[in-house]
Image (tube, rainbow, N blue to C red):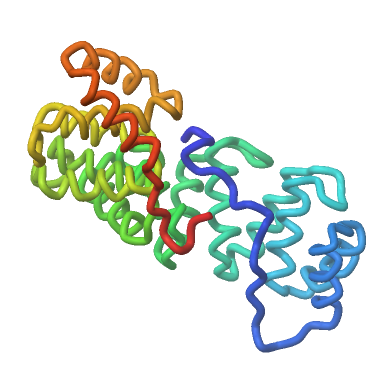
Amino acid sequence: MKKHLVVKISLVITFLFTTQVFAGFEEGKAAFVARDFTKAHKEFEPLALKGNVQAQHILGMMYDEGQGVKQDYAKAAEWYKKAGEQGNQDSQYNLGVMYAQAQGVERNDDESFKWFEKAAKQGHILSQFALGRLYTVGRGTKPDGKLACDWYRKAAEQHHYKAQLALGKNYLDGNGIKKDVVMAEQWIRKSAEQGHHKAEYEMGMLYRDGVAVKKDAKEAYMWFELAAKQDHVGAQQARDAMAKTMKAEEIAAAKLAASNWHAKLPPNKP
């Protein structure tokens, strides 16, 4: 699985605490926020050794990123596994990535699938999308278009823009699900409205060809223009080809619409 499909979770995290207070945890948190990673490691390590799942996950991240310690993917994987075995979703996801990319562990597609599945079943969005991809390509499991769509849908319903596009494309092509161009347009639009350049290109194609929407050259040009601004080569070519068949005032109106467009980001997306 390519890294850009399942990037690791940012270290800009929100700490979720249990009601039980562990001595040193607040000190470790304060040091981490202050970017005093050496002190943070000193506070978190004894807690992690005692089985504190949050401290274990944080230590995994610190070894993963080389914060307060020398970067060591093998140690990162060890701590992620300890936390993952206690049900920490983020650690489970990170282990899935590491097994997929042979980072600190030997590449093992079965293990990668196993950890993604554990996190996905707990509602972890990135893991749900990752499972959709694995079922699509048949990595760590047998290819299964229906299950791929099922997992894409779970992530898409939580506003994952890549999952929305994948589900929309599957509806458009009838992959693993009954072909439905109306549903395809709805999911592709949701992704495009979050500013996903690939989905913007697909919306341009739908308006250009009149699939599930009324054919509209200006609307198609607008979507191609939006994707082209994000260096989508296909959109650039499609936009330029359309320009040859459009009036100057139509092109101007489409460009104005594109310049005034603001992606409708969901509440949980920066």
Decide if residue 130 is on the left or right side of residue 199.
right
In the image, 121 versus 267, the foreground residue is: 267
- Name the quadrant containing residue 213: top left
The image position of residue 200, as x and y in percent, is 31, 36
The image position of residue 91, as x and y in percent, is 60, 58
- Residue at the limit of the structure toward the front, as seen here: 249
Q: Residue at x 47, y 39 (%)?
A: 5
Q: Residue at x 91, y 63 (%)?
A: 39
Decide if residue 103 is on the left or right side of residue 141.
right
The image position of residue 24, as x and y in percent, is 86, 77
Q: How many marks?
A: 0
Vertical arrangement, residue 161 with respect to residue 59, above or below: above
Q: Residue at x 42, y 65 (%)?
A: 123
The image position of residue 199, as x and y in percent, is 31, 37
- Name the quadrant containing residue 261: top left
- Name the quadrant containing residue 181: top left
Decide if residue 244 is on the left or right side of residue 68.
left
Vertical arrangement, residue 93 with respect to residue 234, above or below: below
Q: Residue at x 27, y 31 (%)?
A: 253
In the image, 249 versus 219, the foreground residue is: 249
